[in-house]
């Protein structure tokens, strides 16, 4: 499958049209951004690591009955996937308080939440990705009706249960993550975008060491080493 015209260039990926009108190719870039584009950098090889990690996780979720856009990994930096109409809601799932949740609500960093929190943010960089409640989603017509919000919440919780166990058995604690959903050409809601440490907070279960994009956000260094370690553990090559 060949890349045709560029459909969209985002902060982390380029999206290409293909010969098949139902399929897109995502090209994973080495660029890193944080704080809504306020902090920028490039790490050679980061894109390939995210593509490989995403590929493994999409395959795992597909096997477990989660509908996703994934079709195939083409090469180190390219993934073939279904084209979708993006639902402009970032679905945030949190098991442990950290980052903006701790800052905004004064919850102690690292506190295990009494239940899994699912939040919706408006995927709009100009507005700074503000929080949405269900009524906001309906007023903005981001979904057809409340059942679609319920479905995304249900899928997000299911994905959380699956990935928490998956990572847990690899000595990684799934702290929180962001998901995106879209509509495929049959109008079904499917999981899209990427499943990488750019969008997931992962802590080493023993040392508590951060193994995700917080290494960049907080200037800790060693981002690529951490992402490679995540991939190794996913592939079962640790110890
Ligand atoms: N299957 C798909 N069909 C159509 N668009 C998709 C699909 N999967 C992901 N996308 C979209 O492609 C874009 C990928 O770009 P990228 O990951 O660089 O993100 P971004 O838009 O810059 O911003 P951010 O991830 O910070 O919100 C995103 O807008 C994402 O919603
Ligand atoms: Mg993105």
Image (cartoon, helix red, strand yellow):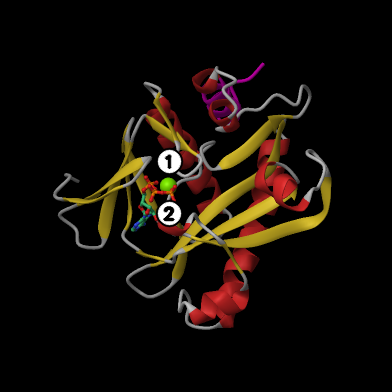
Residue 159 in percent (x, y) is at 62, 55
In front here: 16 or 222?
222
Decide if ligand 1 comes within 8 Å of the CB at mark 1: no
Residue 193 in percent (x, y) is at 42, 51
**Above or below, 106 relative to 152:** above
**Above or below, 237 relative to 176:** above
In front here: 236 or 86?
86
Does residue 170 show up?
no
Whether residue 187 appears in magenta in the rendering, the answer is no
Please tell me in which quadrant of the rendered image residue 192 appears: bottom left
User: Looking at the image, is mark 2 or mark 1 earlier in the sequence?
Assistant: 1
Query: Is most of the magenta stretch helix, strand or loop?
Result: helix
Secondary structure of the residue carrying tag 1 is loop
For the point 36% across and 42% down, the residue is 11
Q: Quadrant of the C terminus?
A: top right
Secondary structure of the residue carrying tag 2 is helix
Does residue 88 show up?
yes
The answer to whether 93 appears left or right of 223 in the picture is right
Decide if ligand 1 comes within 8 Å of the CB at mark 2: yes
For the point 35% across and 63% down, the residue is 84
> What residue is disc 1 on?
37
In the image, the segment drawn in magenta is 226-239
How many neighbours does mark 2 have within 10 angstroms: few (below 14), some (14-19), or many (20 or more)? few
How many neighbours does mark 1 have within 10 angstroms: few (below 14), some (14-19), or many (20 or more)? few
User: Are discs 2 and 1 less than 8 Å apart at CB?
Assistant: yes
Whether residue 236 appears in magenta in the rendering, the answer is yes
Residue 219 in percent (x, y) is at 56, 22
- C-alpha distance separating marks 2 and 1: 9 Å
The answer to whether 45 appears left or right of 107 in the picture is left
For the point 72% across and 42% down, the residue is 98
> What residue is disc 2 on?
125
| Count of numbered badges drawn on the protein | 2
């Amino acid at each position: 499958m060949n890349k045709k015209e560029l459909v969209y260039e985002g902060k982390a990926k380029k999206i290409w049209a293909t010969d098949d009108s139902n399929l897109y190719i995502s090209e994973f870039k080495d660029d890193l951004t944080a704080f809504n584009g306020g902090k920028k950098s490039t790490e050679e090889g980061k894109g390939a690591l995210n593509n490989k990690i995403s590929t493994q996780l999409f395959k795992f979720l597909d096997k477990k009955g989660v509908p996703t856009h994934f079709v195939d990994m083409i090469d180190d930096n390219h993934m073939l996937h279904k084209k979708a109409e993006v639902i402009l809601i970032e679905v945030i799932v949190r098991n442990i308080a950290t980052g903006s949740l701790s800052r905004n609500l004064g919850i102690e960093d690292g506190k295990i939440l009494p239940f899994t929190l699912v939040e919706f943010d408006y995927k709009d960089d100009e507005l700074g990705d503000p929080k949405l409640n269900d009524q906001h989603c309906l007023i903005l017509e981001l979904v057809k009706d409340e059942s679609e919000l319920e479905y995304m919440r249900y899928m997000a919780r299911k994905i959380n249960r699956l990935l928490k166990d998956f990572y847990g058995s690899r000595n990684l604690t799934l702290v929180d993550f962001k998901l995106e959903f879209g509509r495929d050409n049959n109008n079904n809601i499917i999981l899209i975008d990427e499943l990488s440490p750019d969008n997931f907070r992962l802590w080493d279960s023993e040392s508590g060491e951060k193994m995700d994009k917080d290494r960049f956000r907080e200037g800790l260094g060693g981002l690529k080493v951490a992402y490679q370690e995540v991939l190794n553990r996913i592939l079962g090559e640790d110890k």
